Amino acid sequence: MDYVNGPGRNHLFVPGPVNIPEQVLRAMNRNNEDYRSPAIPAMTKTLLEDVKQIFKTTSGTPFLIPTTGTGAWESALTNTLSPGDKIISFLIGQFSLLWIDQQKRLNFDVDVVESDWGHGANLEVLASKIAEDKSHTIKAICIVHNETATGVTNNLATVRKILDHYQHPALFLVDGVSSICALDFRMDEWGVDVALTGSQKALSLPTGLGIVCASPKALEATKTAKSVRVFFDWNDYLKFYKMGTYWPYTPSIQLLYGLRAALDLLFEEGLENVLARHARLGKATRLAVEAWGLKNCTQKEEWFSDTVTAVVVPPYIDSAEIVKRAWKRYNLSLGLGLNKVAGKVFRIGHLGNLNELQLLGCLAGVEMVLKDIGYPVKFGSGVAAASALLQNSTPLIPSRI
Amino acid sequence: MDYVNGPGRNHLFVPGPVNIPEQVLRAMNRNNEDYRSPAIPAMTKTLLEDVKQIFKTTSGTPFLIPTTGTGAWESALTNTLSPGDKIISFLIGQFSLLWIDQQKRLNFDVDVVESDWGHGANLEVLASKIAEDKSHTIKAICIVHNETATGVTNNLATVRKILDHYQHPALFLVDGVSSICALDFRMDEWGVDVALTGSQKALSLPTGLGIVCASPKALEATKTAKSVRVFFDWNDYLKFYKMGTYWPYTPSIQLLYGLRAALDLLFEEGLENVLARHARLGKATRLAVEAWGLKNCTQKEEWFSDTVTAVVVPPYIDSAEIVKRAWKRYNLSLGLGLNKVAGKVFRIGHLGNLNELQLLGCLAGVEMVLKDIGYPVKFGSGVAAASALLQNSTPLIPSRI
Amino acid sequence: MDYVNGPGRNHLFVPGPVNIPEQVLRAMNRNNEDYRSPAIPAMTKTLLEDVKQIFKTTSGTPFLIPTTGTGAWESALTNTLSPGDKIISFLIGQFSLLWIDQQKRLNFDVDVVESDWGHGANLEVLASKIAEDKSHTIKAICIVHNETATGVTNNLATVRKILDHYQHPALFLVDGVSSICALDFRMDEWGVDVALTGSQKALSLPTGLGIVCASPKALEATKTAKSVRVFFDWNDYLKFYKMGTYWPYTPSIQLLYGLRAALDLLFEEGLENVLARHARLGKATRLAVEAWGLKNCTQKEEWFSDTVTAVVVPPYIDSAEIVKRAWKRYNLSLGLGLNKVAGKVFRIGHLGNLNELQLLGCLAGVEMVLKDIGYPVKFGSGVAAASALLQNSTPLIPSRI
Amino acid sequence: MDYVNGPGRNHLFVPGPVNIPEQVLRAMNRNNEDYRSPAIPAMTKTLLEDVKQIFKTTSGTPFLIPTTGTGAWESALTNTLSPGDKIISFLIGQFSLLWIDQQKRLNFDVDVVESDWGHGANLEVLASKIAEDKSHTIKAICIVHNETATGVTNNLATVRKILDHYQHPALFLVDGVSSICALDFRMDEWGVDVALTGSQKALSLPTGLGIVCASPKALEATKTAKSVRVFFDWNDYLKFYKMGTYWPYTPSIQLLYGLRAALDLLFEEGLENVLARHARLGKATRLAVEAWGLKNCTQKEEWFSDTVTAVVVPPYIDSAEIVKRAWKRYNLSLGLGLNKVAGKVFRIGHLGNLNELQLLGCLAGVEMVLKDIGYPVKFGSGVAAASALLQNSTPLIPSRI
């Protein structure tokens, strides 16, 4: 029995890994190559230049690390900090929790600022801590731009404002795993020191690349950072950048070509149009949730996420049953509720290379699952609410005008 | 500018070519091979045996011809008939029209039984013609099982009953291009003499294989058929079948492996389940059309097609604009109205490897296009009608229970 | 047991189907599309324009027919000739034999000019027949540019000279299946009226496209040609060319994108460089054969083929055993001897997207097979002879200079 | 200009990444999937069970880590050792050098036993050090099974014998990157505590999986190992193994399916047959080198590697020119000489899914390059020597008998 074989396509709406466009699948359908020939360095050079655009940085230095988001986190921390360094970290959901767990295990002195799940990072607390820290013992602020578990987007511009206001030199480290290429992210403007994402998120590639970008200040910090690191050491990359061979160890040839294709698609659509598309799909999803009479896990509009929506189910329903049923009956993959919100929320990921009708198919599917599971949904209600928005706001496909 | 690159998937709802499952794409992703090695004949032998199941025949002889449906038509006619032979053919839409055009150009004496577009073949006329033809001058009955232009399914069992009732020996030639593997088709039970389909239809492959099946009586007819034929000559195939090498000329290696994968998927799902899925999706589509307040081009329920629905638009709307708009704005590919119904209908193909949520995404898309074009559709209305049926009737995916 | 799974690559050296480059496999790795959207006609228009270059014609009209070489033959004949028309056809091997068989079955009055297998077309006989035909009863000359069964290339320029010398209006129909894109072929300069090839030959695609090109004179001939044709009728294509939709019936979307990629590769390498590569590989193969002490089936140097070499084995060896052994032990696919030369020759195809080291691997393999089979070959002898030539003549890869 | 486009295939003979079989490319040609659905854990469970076979272990616990060989090294060390721990490590070439560099940077107390490049690990020194270490201050022996830079295979059985002889409890950590699945490796029999490889080596996959296997003793060591680790922490995996969800973070769906296909191919061929094939190809390569009058970098027969051969060039030749030329002219990818042997050796990788004729093509190519570069090679000499062996020892392909 092959789990994979249902009739028709799988409808992949977990908040990562996301759908891979055919153009990227094609680009990756290839044999291995010698990564020490002139071809791969030439390609890598261009990739490194172009990938800066997804971070909106000109001064940053990107690293394409053969790892996952978890590895990218580790890379961001160990290259810039030393054991015992005091850092402020915001706990607002499962992924910020996991990052904090990592921070602790890497022996940093983590000052955890916790919010209820569904709330954003408490930046007022940040402000007061920064204000108090005249001696600059705080070495870094670690924040998840978009908490994938609860669908909460934090306001990074405000973080920068707080640091600037108090002229605090703390490093500003951002997990952009479920935001970069999908939500508005401005590395240079916001003075982010390390930003990172994973290939399987909004870039719409397979898992396997941790894409990390370091500001000049972050690179400077590597010189004094005493955290032990080898595989994740940026300096090994920088050494090979200088030599023009680019790779301290073997990259995935396929992911490089895939990244090339993914960036080409992004640039052809236009990064601003990509963000607008995510905004449109996110808003449409929230309108559907509202139409179903369900609550968004996210507690305030300012935190609404345009890449993932966590939907709160009534107490008499187990959200895990929704996810299970969706997969078993409709070939629809939804995200589970995790940890504190397990059983209480299910998640609709709406990021990456996705369009309106894919989302509407998903929403129609959620309606059927809700009915299956005993929730009195009105068929078509969510789809109608979403469609009204989308029909009003979807642009023509530029290449087809 | 590459027309192909819109964000997200293309929603392919023309009544062919249809969506190719990933399993089939994978199977076809391969280099050429020597078709004279033992591997390809061994594989072909199994394919020929297995492909009989899609025709529901045990006595038929299948041919996998490197051609399209049009070539398959020509193969059916020229192998069994001689120039001047009298045949009865039913004109009920664009594809029956094209087949009749071919029949005439191949110099048969075609007695065309015409119906209004949207109606099925007039089998009463057939009955009277057969009744009158005591001398058996009628050599063949040519009928399209499912007229793709109007979404009309003809009743083949009745054709057989008429022939049997009058003990008429005419050959029974059936275009099953948009029916076989999707609609109930029973070659042996209905005494069909030649049945044919194209790989890009319900089998969900690329275009390139005309799949033709001949009854023993049809094979017998080849001995006296005087129509000139070489490329399409079944006898060349039969000669190579006998030798065990199977191919009179080079087949597409990729399509053979693709056909293997497509049959494996069909058999894993179960042919009856596949038919039930098409019935479910067809019915859902018709319920949506009704909910939109639009008419089905098909005039009677007995002719409703479970593979394609032709939707009649109000006189103030040009259906071609709907098709154009769907493609340009929502990456949705719908079928145009053809010939007599050009501008008057658009078509939703719902055949092949397709599931419920894909269809619902399409229906939601049609709603938005209708709104775009000025038709006062109520958002979610068609989706709701379809969902109510589908939520009630969709089985669990067997491999996931 | 899967015949396909030996360790490593299959070494495909039959004279078609040939190796598909990765770039083409990638281009073809895609879902179906609506061929009635603006995208496919736009692409087809460019393909039709570009494909003329492989025929070296500016005045010709190309047709991309979903068929094989056999179908392309039929298309060439039936569109330009009427039953009973007298044609001259040269029988020099299995493929010319098969074409002649088709010509006869299509009811032409075929005057067969036969040569011993291994010889080229007897153009002296042609000259005398043309000289005698003052009343122009001969309607067409049919000739295979390169006889794939014996590795014999005919001199098409001489055919034209003969026709011109006698101012004879016969149509000049050329099977370029194993020549076009590999051997020097000049449609306009040589006044060829219909030229044709198959996608699986030097173009290095899967089987499935018969690529036919018609001169203005050939198009004119369609107006009076009485041969029955529908599927193969060029006029159906021309009608759709005029409408700008291009396709009278469904094309293979995958093969269109594949053809685009194949042409791009050809043009990037440069057609003249492609021909030079084939000349180099053909010569290298012949040097190897000579070094092994074996004979070339081709009897004179002027007929040597740069796309396929038929190697004559000593009488005590069955060449079919060589082919079988090569496949079973070394994953090497060689061509069988066909018909008159069955058991007497085996064939090495060296056409399409192929390079020096691939060929040398094949030659080394042939040496091992010869030893296996009891022929006293000196290991390395053929490879050495071929290498000496190739090391002297292979250019640098332009993109890597 | 696209470096990739030379005519024909790239001949990939670097000692990794190696050629990917078509079966694996096909398996990987797929969209992302939800790794939290029941499908991926079910598949992972089987993979973990099956992957033990490539290590020849029943008691080991495997980890499929989204990383490269460098990461796998780090995982092996940090999970079993604490900073300051004394380890013995053998420096015999570039890859052992890099591992030692990592060991030092991870703050172990590394006792480096150096040999001349081209020599194996000095196990006599090991024996004396172990003999002396009565107090068991040595915590681990780190050894590269096959040094990829020099083509030297170390004798792991002897290492075990030494440890056993002195009843020394040191952990036995083995880099099997260019050996496992290609050379005889026996984790259980040799009492290896951690063994590791990378997916892009003999398994013939893309880069991206570090495959690590830990003995029960190694797992026990994790409990006291104080090295800081998070991403590479086996305990995170073990926790998820226990829960049955298997993945602490997102795996590459494509690599999992690819690994499934790669293991299926290995098991179908038979692991012992795979090793025999590598032995055959390795021996053939060495015979060719000898026939060319060149020296093997490996100084004694007992160290000859069956996965890579480092060929010493005469002093008047720069081996980097050979590599460059091979790529630029013949689309042949050879390995560079690294570090101490830069300019002095070039390397032929002969591991992974590779067959005899591929290797012979490579050897013929090397002959041409040698001539290009001014070395007086006799064409065909190496090929002849290799062919004589291979023709004598290559078995029939089992599925084709």
Image: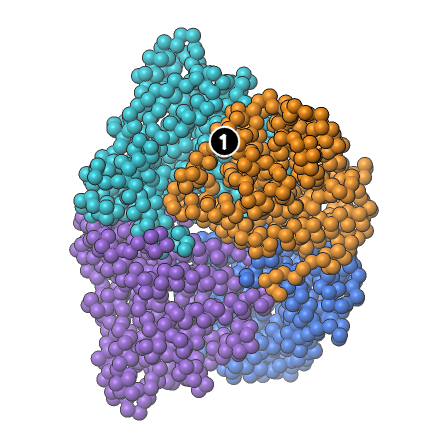
Chain colours: A cyan, B purple, C blue, D orange
Residue B395 visible here: yes
Secondary structure, mark 1, is: loop
* Residue C203 percent across, percent down from the top left: 57, 59
Q: Name which residue type carries label 1.
A: Asp
Crowding at mark 1 (Cα within 10 Å: few <14, some 14-19, many 20+): some
Q: Is residue A326 above or below residue D117?
A: below
* Residue B144 percent across, percent down from the top left: 32, 72
Q: Is residue D339 above or below residue C331?
A: above
- The residue that mark 1 highlights is D233
> How many marks overall?
1
Name the residue rendered at 41%, 22% in the picture.
A142
Q: Quadrant of the N terminus of chain D?
A: top right
Chain of the residue under label 1: D
* Residue C19 percent across, percent down from the top left: 59, 58
Q: Quadrant of residue B94?
A: bottom left
Pick out the residue farthest to the top. A134
Q: Quadrant of the C terminus of chain D?
A: bottom right
Pick out the residue farthest to the bottom. B135
Name the residue rendered at 33%, 84% in the picture.
B170
Name the residue rendered at 27%, 45% in the picture.
A366
**Of A274 and A268, the residue lying toward us:** A274
State left or right for residue D244 relative to residue A153.
right
* Residue D48 percent across, percent down from the top left: 50, 44
Residue A33 visible here: no
Name the residue rendered at 32%, 71% in the picture.
B185
**Of A358 and D65, the residue lying toward us:** D65
